Each structure stands twice: as C-alpha cells, then as structure tokens.
Amino acid sequence: MSVAEVSVLRSSEARQARWPAPLVVISLVIVALGFTAAIFSSIIVPNAEQENLLLGISQPSWHHVLGTDELGRDVLAMLIAGARTSVLGPLVIAVGSMVIGNIVGLISGYFGGWVDSLAMRWVDMMFSLPALLVAIVVTGIAGSSYAVALIVLIVLFSPGDARVVRGAVLDQRHRPYIEAARLSNLSSKRIMTLHLWPNIAPIALANGFLDFAFALVSLASLSFLGLGVGPGSPDWGRTLSNNMGLLQSNAWAAAAPGVAIILMAAAMNVLGDWVYERLEARGLEQ
Amino acid sequence: MNARLWLSFVLRRLGASAAVVLILSFGIFGLLYIAPGSIVLTLLGTRPASPQTIAAVRAEYHLNQPFFIQYLHWLDNAVHGNLGTSIQSGGRVLPSIAARFPLTLEVVLYGSIIAVGAGIPLGIWAALRRGRGTDQVITAGAVAAVGAPSFAVGLLLLLVFAVDLNWFPVYGTGQGFFSTMWHLTLPALALGLASMGLIVRFTRAAMARELSQDYIVFAQARGLSRMQVTSYALRNSLVPVLTASGLILTSTLSATVMVETTFALPGLGTLLVNSVTFKDVPVVQAVALLLTLLITVINLLVDVTYALADPRILFTRHGE
C-alpha cells in the first residue's frame, strides 16, 4: 500500500457515514403524512369506524384501496383514524418526558453536589428497569386506560432525557460565557433558562426525536396487548392484533398498521440521528 | 493485591445488585395495592366472597398487619419458593412458571445467537467500507431494525414466510430439536432483529475507531496483509461489543413478551400478559420477580466480564 493510499484512507476515515439527503427527505415526508393524518383525521375520514356487515372482509378494490376488515370497515380509513392515538400519544410522551428531563437535568448538572448525586441515583435505578415490561405490568394492573399508559411512559422515559441534558450541562458549565454571567451577578435561574438552556436545546431536541420513535413503539406494543386504548379503537397496535386472524383473507388489514408503525418509527429515528449528526458537524467546525 | 481488588469489586457489585433487587421487590409487592378495588377482592378473583374465603385470603397475606410487615411475610415466602396461588387457575404459581420457562429461554437464546451471529459480521463489513454504499445500506438497515417493534416485524415475517411462501409453520412449537428449531425460527428472527441492529451499530463504531488508530497505519505501512491488519483491529474492538451483547440479552428478555404474544407461544411472556389482563397479581409478581433476578444476574456477569477484559474498571467506583 502506497503512502498516498494511506493518506486517502485516513482522510476518508474522518468522514462519518452521512445520511443521504433523499433518505432524510423521505423520512420528513413520512413524518409529515403521519402528523397530517393524526391532526385532520376527523375531517379526512369522519366515518372511519362505520361498519358494513353485509360487505364483511374484502380484498383491496377501487372502493376500498386496502380492502375491508371483518366488520366491513375500510382499512385505509381506519389507518388514518388510528393515527390520532398512535402518533399524538407519543408526541405527548416525548414532550412530557423532555420537560421533566430538562428541568431535572439542568438543575442536577448546574448545581452538582447532593442534588446531582440523588438525581443520578434515581436515573441509574430507572435505567436498569426494562421499560416496556414495567409499562405492561403497571398499566395492566393499575386499570388500563390511555391516560395511565401515557403517564407511565412519561415517568419511564424522563430519566434518559435527564441524563442527556445533564451531560450537556456539564459540558457547558465551565465555559467562559457562563462564568461571565455568574460574575455579572445574574441569578442562577436566569443563567440556567436564558444562557445555559438555549445552548443545550438542540441536543434535547435531537433526543426528543429518538424519544418519540421509542414512545411510538412502546405505546403501539401496549395497545397491541390490549392495554391503553379501548377495544375497537382504530389505534394501529390494536388494529394489528385484532386483524391477526385475517392473514389469509385480507392480509392488508393487519399488515398496513404494522407497516405504518415501522415506517413512522424508522423515519423518526433517521431524523433524530440526522439532527445529532448536524450538531456534531457544527461542533467540529467550532 | 490483585485478589483483594477483585474481591472488593465483586462484593461491591453484589451489594449494589442485592440493593436493586430489594427495592424492586418492594415495588413488585406494591402491585397488589395499585390494582383498582379492594385487595381482598383482587386476590379473590372469581371465587365467591364468603366470610370464610375472605378470612383465608386475609390470613394468607397477613392483611391485618401493617404494609411493611405484609411485605416481609411475602418476601420470606418468595425466598422459600412459595409464590402463592394463581387467581385464574387456582394452582401453585411456581410449577406453572417452571413449565413455561424452557420455551422462553429457547427463543431468547436462539434470537440472541441470530443477533450476534449476523450483527458482528455486518458491523465489521460496514466499518471496512466506511462512507461507501455498502456502509450506508447496512447503517440505514440497522437504524430501521433498532426502531422496528418486534410484533410488527413478526407479523410481516409470518405473512411473507409462513402464509405466502409456506416455508415455516404459522403457529405451534414443534416436537424434537429440529422441529422446534423450525417452529421457532420466525419468532427468533422477530426477536433478534432489533438487537442485531444495535450490535451492528456498536461493532461498526468500535471497529471504525480501532481502524483509525496509529497502530493500524503502522501495520499497513509495514506491508502487512489486509487480513492481518483487520484481525488486529477486530481483536481490540470485540471486547466492548461482547459486553454490549450481554446488555442486549436483557432487552431481548423483555421483547420476548411481544413476540410470544404475536406467535401465540406458551412461554413466560404470554403467561405474564394473560395474568396482567386477568389481574392475576400473584402470577404477575412471580414472573416479575423472576425476570428481575435474571436481568440482575446478567448485568452482574456483564460487569465481571468487562472487568476481566479491562482490569482498569477495578479501580473505579461504579457509576463514575
């Protein structure tokens, strides 16, 4: 191997595997479609849950693009209607756990000391728990409702966010701009919210994307097991388990919500990863 | 000196694990109290609520005594293998768990073998072709796999390989080694895919880091073959990957609940889901306790393996 080849190898090693632009655009489109369906489902498909027992199960046709289920409900309409609980629920979880995680992480990282070690004990403890199992057991036993499922998942997700935010705070805490703010006698609250947090927000946001993807899968898993959403709800996880028996007659009835969950989760993961990558690239330039 | 370091390390980790198990067992006992309605009615289930049955339940769970004493009685019973009676079936809890445990273990091991066996080579391949098409395809696939829920993957696998192509059975567990393998292949694939994605990412990152070290450049400059250089990097990057695989085993353990439900396999996972749905608290407590112990033991083993591979760990306190 020649010296030139070695140097070429070295320079390409510095380059990370970048997300190709088309993949990022496709992910953006998928996420946009999901949220459009979730927000406007009552306008797009007002009668999604209307049964047509005379029709029953049918294969995809011009009238029903993805066919119908056992009760003659249109699979595509159910898919769009199901986006509300399947997509907005994870958004609530991601936002909720980010709010808690940011507050705990900021305070714990900024003040340090016993507050910090107490908070980190809690984080370590929660981290050692298998989140999905805990969610299944607690949601199931405590009386399964959608609100309980959301609250349990927020509690389980916030420690991860707290850890990420705390790490970012520790990285910023001793930078000159924070020391300057301290010397100017600004209150801790003001430094944390107006000076420190804006520099951490991008990392928290990127983490929020990954939270959303994980929350989507967890919530869908719960409703697949019949926990969280009520029977007959068009929620994707629930529809999938309801239509497991239709694999031979109209496989789309079960496959469509499954594909929707997978695509939505993958797209969010790609976007989260991409945001992280942009942040890292920006960090290198500084 | 070395033996003393090891002893203190292992004792410290054992102590920490025991503390975690104790705290969690408290929470698991507390499950009784978060069920809606009175505890007596929860424990009676479908049995008639006569004064005799109520008295029996109150006596068995020491409900006349304070919460903490109830917990101690419950813990004492659990340690002695008495995990109570199932509300749903009326039978002892422990035998029904023991009957279902082997199947879960088989699926988890099979899935983990697939994840490690395919994940490590794919990760190495991606690291060797960094920044090129192969790398991008593998990395993108890994990200999609990590995010994909096992039940949806399982459903698609069923649809393609069992219903359409007819290569694998739709349900059942099979008799004998080869038939069991054949029946459990799709569940193991569904279970292992997410872990495989994680292992690919770990391996790729570790391998890429090693490949950019100076000793690799030096080895290349000395004209060693590509194979030899790769094997140097591989040896150094596998340690973190193998310890990560141990941690992945614990997440596989929880994912098996979803996969067993999807494929209707009579394992621990379906037992847990059925019991949760039925509010059969004693069974839920027993399964949760067993899983807690398993996960703690795996974590402990991972820690020790890690210390064996990198003795510097012995000098640091945990969590730093």
Image (cartoon, coloured by chain):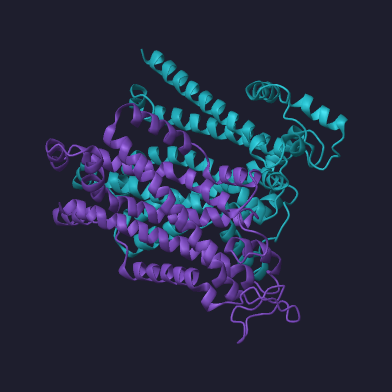
Chain colours: A purple, B cyan
Residue B121 can be seen in this image: no
Give x and y (percent) for residue B261: 66, 53
**Left or right of B10 on screen, residue B44:** right
Give the vertical position of B199 relative to A125 (above or below).
below
> How many marks do you count on the picture?
0
Residue in view at x 41 percent, y 58 percent: A269
Give x and y (percent) for residue B291: 60, 36
Give the vertical position of B123 relative to B16 (above or below).
below
| Image quadrant in which you'd find residue A245 | bottom right
Residue in view at x 51 percent, y 49 percent: B115
| Image quadrant in which you'd find residue B139 | bottom left
Give the vertical position of B181 relative to B15 (above or below).
below
Give x and y (percent) for residue A183: 12, 36
Viewer-side residue, B249 vs A57: A57
Give the vertical position of B51 relative to B109 (above or below).
above
Residue A75 can be seen in this image: yes
Viewer-side residue, A39 vs A18: A39
In this view, which residue lies farthest toward the bottom?
A: A62
Viewer-side residue, A114 vs B209: A114
**Left or right of B312 on screen, residue A195:** left
Give x and y (percent) for residue B197: 45, 53
**Left or right of A19 on screen, residue A266:** right
Residue in view at x 60 percent, y 87 percent: A62
**Left or right of B168 on screen, residue B50:** right
| Image quadrant in which you'd find residue A15 | bottom left
